[in-house]
Amino acid sequence: MIALTGLNLEEMREYAVSQGLPAFRGNQICQAIQKGLTFEEMTVLPVSLREQLALHAVAQPVRIMSRYVSQSDDTVKYLFALRDGNCVEGVLMHYHYGYSLCISTQVGCKMGCKFCASTLEGCVRNLSCAEMIGEVICANRDLGHKGRVGHIVLMGAGEPLDNYDEVIRFLRLVSREESCGVGLRNISLSTCGLVERIRDLADTHLPVTLSLSLHAPNDRIRKTIMPVANRYSMDEVLSACRYYVETTGRRVIFEYALIGGVNDRDEDAKELAGRLRGLQCHVNLIPLNTVKERNLKGVDEQTVQRFLHNLEKLHISVTRRREMGDDIAGACGQLRRKVLRQPDQKTAALTADGGDKNETQLFNEYE
Ligand code: SAH
């Protein structure tokens, strides 16, 4: 089965021709796919043709399984169902500059960060380019006349640079007009710091923003919360970031989740400022979302402000991340875990999704 959301216009026209159709059918299918239509809903095509296509192709590889709307703002958290019975999360946020969608790049994650819920069961599999585009199409269809996704952050479940080839395919396709038309400059990719891949990404010259999950001022602290720090030292990570800045001319964003008693002291801020000196960058302070399976505490607002002022005094550009939809956001990965623990909800969701026995069996692997 080929998932058509992963094809660009030329590939879609070639696909149409390979099915014995005139190439213009490819244009029609491409437009319909972007609207989020299933084959059944593609009424511009004759019924017989829709049936023929459905034998070997999937129009929409992602469906919305459930959606949670924040009471405090317009934030929507989605649980997306994939065709093999897996599910991933996404979050749609409404900013003054438009809609921004946070997408997942893997089912689970194998990086093992101690504060993160997405990695608790390891990585099940990579998402394909077609599935990542599918997440955006789902949000666009859900938005309807309200607007379209204009910004994307690769900050949901998964380590994007651990799924490098499909993520690069996604970046090249999602920015095309016939696809989702989200400009690369409006896309941020967040990584825990896979050094070789950061350099590879820089060499592609795709003008995305690199966000680096640093979370510590030195290797000693970083190793206690991020296993990846045993593989790459902070010096190696920061030198890859420097290469990214030099190659792309774009500043790097450092993400720093404040964890009580771990990385929130005044001397941590000072050490961090020293490490970042001379690097064209910005620090994003994130109040930790507590994960109940993890034994880590967040910090109070006073600590956030103190840390922020310490960095400012040392001339580091820094902001505190705004919290969106705090009643529904929770820690990324929690929603999927909740579904995995509730077999009834799984089955119901799959039935609604047209899931077959096979899909249900795949789901059961996690019980
Ligand atoms: N694997 C990538 C992208 C996914 S995580 C990465 O590591 O960057 C997206 C961001 O959320 C990262 O900065 C991550 O460190 C942060 N994060 C994960 N769990 C969190 C939590 N419980 N509270 C606050 N931030 C968290």
Image (cartoon, helix red, strand yellow):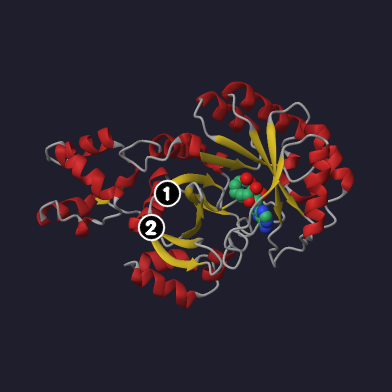
> Which numbered disc, 1 or 2, marks the residue that appears first in the sequence?
2
Crowding at label 2, few (<14), some or many (≥20) Cα neighbours within 10 Å?
some
Q: Nearer the viewer, residue 176 or 200?
A: 176
Q: Residue at x 70, y 45 (%)?
A: 319
Task: Check the image and name the residue furthest to the right.
Answer: 267
Task: Check the image and name the residue furthest to the bottom.
Answer: 344
Could you say where residue 277 lies in the image, as x and y percent from the top left? 78, 29
Q: Secondary structure at mark 2?
A: helix
Q: How far is mark 1 from mark 2, CA to CA?
A: 8 Å
Q: Residue at x 38, y 69 (%)?
A: 350
Q: Secondary structure at mark 1?
A: strand
Q: Are marks 1 and 2 in contact (CB under 8 Å)?
A: yes
Quick check: can you spot residue 72? yes
Can you tell which mark lies on residue 149?
1
Give the vertical position of 40 relative to 235 (above or below): below
Residue 144 figure quarter: bottom left
Q: Nearer the viewer, residue 99 or 156?
A: 99
Could you say where residue 75 lies in the image, as x and y percent from the top left? 51, 61
Specify the amino acid type for callout 2: Leu
Residue 302 figure quarter: bottom right
Can you tell which mark lies on residue 143?
2
Could you say where residue 341 lies in the image, as x and y percent from the top left? 55, 72
Quarter of the C terminus within the rendering: bottom right
Give the vertical position of 53 relative to 237 (above or below): below
Left or right: 78 with respect to 114?
left
Residue 333 figure quarter: bottom right
Left or right: 362 with respect to 43?
right
Specify the amino acid type for callout 1: Val
Crowding at label 1, few (<14), some or many (≥20) Cα neighbours within 10 Å?
many
Q: Residue at x 68, y 37 (%)?
A: 282
